[in-house]
């Protein structure tokens, strides 16, 4: 049964205490040896030498409940093992879209604060000079940083403090095809040639590079701490998966998205992850840029469906085709999980596993998008193969985001709720438990910097002011449920808006042009709009949303 976290007992903060104890020991040694004349940089490196390594793993368009440890039927044994030996946050949030989320997670700021997404009065552009990425903040503390996979942030990874990088920095026509290498680069240099055969799969290649970086790090830097950022494309469209991985799910989804959604919701309630009723499907809500139903059938075939309608209303041909699509989506997630397992095994082999903080999240909810881009879709190609171009679509996206409403792009829970697994054997005592602290991607950078022994700067070296991060360190939550409390969490994306203060959430869907008010304590699934019953509460939250935006606008006017 779902229970609200108790706030009656004080957390022990073992992680913080251990770090402070280490700092005290180092200071004592310095007194004895007369080393107080050492530079600040040297002292920072001494502290950082005892800090954890960090492995930040980000999935792309993975649903909140896809993983087994979050109630899904998709086989994710390695993620499940990390969750069983660590923490699962049930109220972690992204921005609801890929590029703003990536800007948040590596900077510690809301995307609009750093021009990585637009809002009224803010145009999207390059980050201000003071909005450096996390690797640059970790470098003075003795960390080495590596990037593998998707980028989607302004500038290049090497310029952002990463020592090595492999991925797709610049979009090409087929940048998101899993069997192609045309747009991939290593350390800023375009990869020679291009492969489009099915002997290559980007999810495997991303893990290969990450493992290569870890091996190189141990060889050249010994036990110095590292920050490894692994950004998989899986399970982003197009639905591309290895044949054997798809075969493992053959026939599994013929019962349909309504049954799968109901089963997930039941498991999630039993696990204590949610306590809300299962909301109805939003049959008429899809991205405005989706191909229209007639065009989908023309360009894909008669098995395609453009809306999240009742499964029983589909034809047999549609049901078979849709079941195949979800099997490919599941295969993509399972393959990503297997590659995460290989990376974890590398940590164990190099003796870094116990003192590595592993964070796993998804950049946004599952996608209802149905588009075709680049080289297009070959109707004769097998679903999931290199020449196919299929998207999950709103029916299965609704199931993947169970029990939350709507999808990637919206600021309802289905778009912004993310799984967040936190694993650190040396630093976290709790095993297999839930954390219900509402948190956001803006909290990742402050958390890592806190554990690294650093502090958020107030100025750059040239005196340029650095705004404080709106994020909070999640370290207290590693010890106790409910130990981290934000005054407010804020969202804005392409006309959608939301703010959460305590258990109250106000959200605006641009299609409706009206605020909706929800009490997430009992209605995380956003089924009971209270805006008409409590207009004063809605007005107060709306005013706070605007006040936060006004602050961002004013700060950016002062920025260089």
Image (cartoon, rainbow, N blue to C red):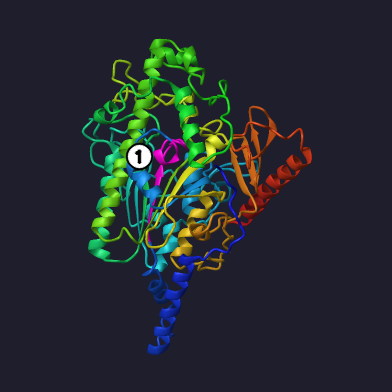
Q: Secondary structure at mark 1?
A: loop
Residue 476 vertical position relative to residue 122 in the rendered view, above or below: below
Residue 36 vertical position relative to residue 141 in the rendered view, above or below: below
Residue 454 vertical position relative to residue 103 in the rendered view, above or below: below
**Nearest the camera: 276 or 234?**
276
Q: Is residue 171 visible?
A: yes
Q: Which residue is mark 1?
A: 76
Q: Is residue 483 magenta?
A: no
What percent of the width, then of the height, locates residue 69? Answer: 41, 41
Residue 284, image quadrant: top right
Q: Is residue 70 magenta?
A: yes
Residue 159, image quadrant: bottom left
Residue 170, image quadrant: top left
Which residue shows up at 25% across the image and 46% down it?
Answer: 208
Residue 207 vertical position relative to residue 517 in the rendered view, above or below: below
Residue range in magenta is: 53-71
Question: Dot 1 surroundings within 10 Å: few (below 14), some, or many (20 or more)?
Answer: many
Which residue shows up at 27% across the image and 31% down it?
Answer: 245
What percent of the width, then of the height, locates residue 31? Answer: 43, 87
What percent of the width, then of the height, locates residue 368? Answer: 48, 27
Direction right: furthest residue: 536
Image quadrant holding the N terminus, namely top right
Q: Is residue 210 visible?
A: no
Image quadrant holding the C terminus, namely bottom right
């Amino acid at each position: 049964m779902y229970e609200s976290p108790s706030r009656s007992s004080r957390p022990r903060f073992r992680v913080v205490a251990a770090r402070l104890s280490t700092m005290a020991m180092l200071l004592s040694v310095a007194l004895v040896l007369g080393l107080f004349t050492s530079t600040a940089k040297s002292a920072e490196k001494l502290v950082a030498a005892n800090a954890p390594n960090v492995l930040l793993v980000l999935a792309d368009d993975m649903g909140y409940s896809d993983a087994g440890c979050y109630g899904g039927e998709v086989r994710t044994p390695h993620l499940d093992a990390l969750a069983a030996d660590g923490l699962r946050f049930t109220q972690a949030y992204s921005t609801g879209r890929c590029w703003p989320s990536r800007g948040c997670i590596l900077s510690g700021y809301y995307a609009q604060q750093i021009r990585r997404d637009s809002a009224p009065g803010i145009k999207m552009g390059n980050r201000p000079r003071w909005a450096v990425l996390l690797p640059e903040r970790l470098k003075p503390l003795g960390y080495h940083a590596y990037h593998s996979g998707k980028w989607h942030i302004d500038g290049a990874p090497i310029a952002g403090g990463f020592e090595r990088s492999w991925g797709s920095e610049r979009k090409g026509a087929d940048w998101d095809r899993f069997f192609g290498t045309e747009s991939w680069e290593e350390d800023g240099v375009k990869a020679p040639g291009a492969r489009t055969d099915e002997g290559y799969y980007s999810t495997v290649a991303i893990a290969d590079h990450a493992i290569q970086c870890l091996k190189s790090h141990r060889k050249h830097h010994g036990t110095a701490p590292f920050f490894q950022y692994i950004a998989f494309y899986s399970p982003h469209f197009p639905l591309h998966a290895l044949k054997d991985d798809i075969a493992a799910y053959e026939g599994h989804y013929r019962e349909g998205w309504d049954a799968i959604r109901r089963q997930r919701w039941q498991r999630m309630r039993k696990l204590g992850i949610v306590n809300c009723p299962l909301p109805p499907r939003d049959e008429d809500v899809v991205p405005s840029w989706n191909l229209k139903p007639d065009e989908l059938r023309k360009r894909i075939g008669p098995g395609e469906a453009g809306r999240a309608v009742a499964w029983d209303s589909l034809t047999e041909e549609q049901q078979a085709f849709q079941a195949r699509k979800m099997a490919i989506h599941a295969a993509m997630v399972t393959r990503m999980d297997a590659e995460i397992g290989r990376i974890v095994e590398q940590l164990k082999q190099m003796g870094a596993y116990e003192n590595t903080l592993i964070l796993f999240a998804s950049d946004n909810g599952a996608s209802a998008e149905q588009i075709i881009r680049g080289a297009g879709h070959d109707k004769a190609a097998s679903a999931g193969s290199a020449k196919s171009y299929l998207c999950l679509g709103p029916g299965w996206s609704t199931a993947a985001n169970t029990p939350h409403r709507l999808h990637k792009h919206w600021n309802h829970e289905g778009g912004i709720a993310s799984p967040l697994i936190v694993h650190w054997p040396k630093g976290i005592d709790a095993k297999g438990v839930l954390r219900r602290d509402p948190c956001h991607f803006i909290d990742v950078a402050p958390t890592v910097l806190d554990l690294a022994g650093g502090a958020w700067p107030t100025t750059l070296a040239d005196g340029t002011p650095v705004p404080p991060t709106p994020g909070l360190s999640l370290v207290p939550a590693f010890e106790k449920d409910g130990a981290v409390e934000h005054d407010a969490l804020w969202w804005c994306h392409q006309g959608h808006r939301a703010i959460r203060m305590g258990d109250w959430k106000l959200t605006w869907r641009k299609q409706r042009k009206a605020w909706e008010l929800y009490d997430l304590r009992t209605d995380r699934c956003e089924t009971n709009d209270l805006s008409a019953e409590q207009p004063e509460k809605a007005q107060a939250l709306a005013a706070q949303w605007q006040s936060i935006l006004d602050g961002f606008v004013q700060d950016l006017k002062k920025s260089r």
